[in-house]
Amino acid sequence: MSIHLTESARARILGFLELDTTALGLRFGVSRSGCSGWGYKVEVAHERRPDDAVFDDGGVHIFVDAASLAQVDGTRIDYVQQGLNAQFVFSNPNVTGGCGCGSSFTTDAERIIEL
């Protein structure tokens, strides 16, 4: 089980974490969203929760709750800048489909959660 950061994503996240002295790392997971089912949640982590899996990638602690883990395991997080636009981009090997507007996705792991 793992989450991977590219160099550009790691640098951007470390910049956010340096601004918040109470930050422990990055919280990454999913929540129900959009027409396909799941959307990514990304925020600064201020606590470790009992069901968190914690990954370390180049000094960035990544906290993933147990309910999200099967959906995001193996995800590569990149940070891409194109002109004036910048965004985090997720390459998730678990994604099996998505909505037309690109705001949500489905995975085979979803069936396990619903059982």
Image (cartoon, grey):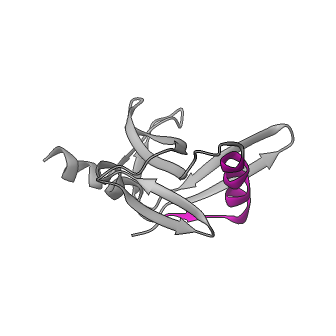
Q: Which residue occupies the extreme right position in the image?
A: 83
Q: Which residue occupies the extreme left position in the image?
A: 115
Residue at coordinates 67% horizontally, 60% vertically from top-left?
10
Task: Tell me the magenta residue range.
Answer: 3-18
- On screen, residue 11 above or below 18: below
Place of residue 59 in the rendered image (x, y in percent of width and height, measured from the top left): 62, 67
Residue at coordinates 35% horizontally, 55% vertically from top-left?
52
Judged left or right of residue 79, residue 63 is left
The chief SS type of the magenta part is helix
- Does 16 appear in magenta? yes
Residue at coordinates 57% horizontally, 68% vertically from top-left?
57
Residue at coordinates 62% horizontally, 50% vertically from top-left?
89
Judged left or right of residue 51, residue 38 is right
Place of residue 101 in the rendered image (x, y in percent of width and height, measured from the top left): 54, 32
Q: Quadrant of the N terminus?
A: bottom left
Place of residue 26 in the rendered image (x, y in percent of width and height, measured from the top left): 54, 51
Name the foreground residue: 35 vs 29. Answer: 29
- On screen, residue 79 above or below 5: above
- On screen, residue 98 above or below 76: above
Q: From where the camera sits, is residue 35 visible? A: yes
Q: From where the camera sits, is residue 108 visible? A: no
Name the foreground residue: 69 vs 60. Answer: 60
Place of residue 98 in the rendered image (x, y in percent of width and height, measured from the top left): 44, 42
